[in-house]
Image (cartoon, rainbow, N blue to C red):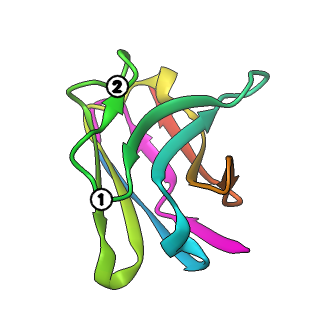
Amino acid sequence: QVQLVESGGGLVQTGGSLRLSCVASGRHFSASHIGWFRQAPGKQRRDVVRDTWSGGSAEYVLSVKGRFTISSDKAKNTVYLQMNSLKPEDTAVYYCGLYIDGSWQYGQGTLVTVSS
C-alpha cells in the first residue's frame, strides 16, 4: 500500500507559476516510476510527465514541454511539479502517481485553475 498526498494547487493568472508537491509514504520505495497526471473538467485523466524513480528520464507531453519540470527530494519522500507560464488550458485536477507492482497508484489530486 502506498499513500500519496498532493498539495500546492490554487488559482493563478495566465503566465503565472505554481509548484505542486506530492508526499509519498508506505511502500513507495517499491516504485519504479513516478509521474504527474491531470484531469480537465469533463475529460479523462491524461499524462503530464513520467520519469523513473531514480530520475533523469523524464518524458513530458508536448503541451507542457519547456514549461513544466518534475523533480524529487528522496530524503523528504516528495515529488514536485514546477509549472511556469501557465495557460487556461492547464486548468485541471493534478494527480501524482507511482508505478508499483504493475499499476499506477494515485493521490487524491489538487486543483489548479488558471484564469485568463
Q: Which residues are magenta?
A: 1-16
Which quadrant, please, contains the C terminus?
top left
10 w.r.t. 92: above or below: below
Residue that protrudes farthest toward the top in the picture: 62
Q: Kindly identify the amino acid type of the residue bearing the numbered disc 1.
A: Ser
Q: Nearer the viewer, residue 46 or 18?
A: 46
Q: Amino acid at mark 2?
A: Val
**Total numbered labels:** 2
Q: Is residue 72 left or right of residue 100?
A: left
Q: Is residue 110 above or below residue 61?
A: below
What kind of element bears circle 1?
loop
The residue labelled by disc 2 is 64
In the rendered image, residue 52, in percent from the top left (x then y), is placed at 37, 49
Q: Residue at x 46, y 32 (%)?
A: 48
The residues tagged by marks 2 and 1 sit, at their Cα atoms, a distance apart of: 22 Å
Q: Quick check: 54 above or below 95?
A: below
Q: Residue at x 66, y 73 (%)?
A: 3
Residue mark closest to the camera, 2 vs 1: 1
- Residue 4 on the magenta segment: yes
Q: Main secondary structure of the magenta part?
A: strand
Residue situated in front as seen by the camera: 9 or 31: 31
Residue 61 part of the magenta-drawn span: no
Q: Residue at x 47, y 46 (%)?
A: 35
Q: Return the residue at label 1.
A: 54
Element at badge 2? loop
